[in-house]
Image (cartoon, rainbow, N blue to C red):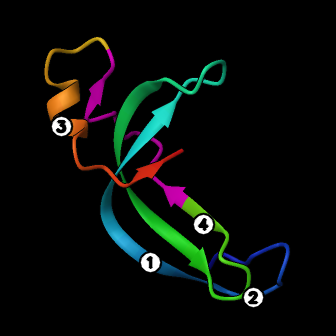
Amino acid sequence: MLVCMQCKRIMNVEAVGTKIVETTGKDGAPYKLWSADVIKCAGCGMEVACTIPKQQPLSEHYEPDFAQLASGVVRVY
């Protein structure tokens, strides 16, 4: 169970297996592509992207297939 620390409400699964792009901290450039479950608070709308600890990224910025795999991704973190 995940609880929103702002609203004190239980968070619900918004999407499963969503492709998300992790960005660099400096300039926000695309860095890694992940498959994640998105959990959302019904109260304030806070979203959390969840992966499993042993999960590897689908692709990284230097790999030739990165741009193709990342096309159409709606969520960027």
Q: Secondary structure at mark 3?
A: helix
- Determine which quarter of the picture holds residue 7: bottom right
Q: Could you say which disc has been placed on residue 14 in the image?
A: 1
- The reply, left or right, for residue 22 in relation to residue 15 is right
The quadrant in which the N terminus is found is bottom right
Q: Could you say which disc has been placed on residue 39 in the image?
A: none
Q: Tell me which residue sits at (51%, 57%) in the image.
A: 49
Residue pointed to by mark 2:
9
- Check disc 1 and give the amino acid type: Glu
User: Pointer 2: residues within 10 angstroms few (<14), some, or many (20+)?
Assistant: some
Residue pointed to by mark 3:
69
What whole-number distance in Å separates the C-alpha atoms at marks 2 and 3? Answer: 34 Å
User: Pointer 1: residues within 10 angstroms few (<14), some, or many (20+)?
Assistant: some
Q: Earlier in the sequence, mark 4 or mark 1?
A: 1
Q: Earlier in the sequence, mark 2 or mark 3?
A: 2
What whole-number distance in Å separates the C-alpha atoms at marks 4 and 2? Answer: 13 Å
Residue pointed to by mark 4:
47
Q: Position of residue 13 (x, y in %)?
A: 46, 79
Q: Secondary structure at mark 2?
A: loop
Q: Is residue 58 magenta?
A: yes
- Check disc 3 and give the amino acid type: Leu
- Determine which quarter of the picture holds residue 8: bottom right
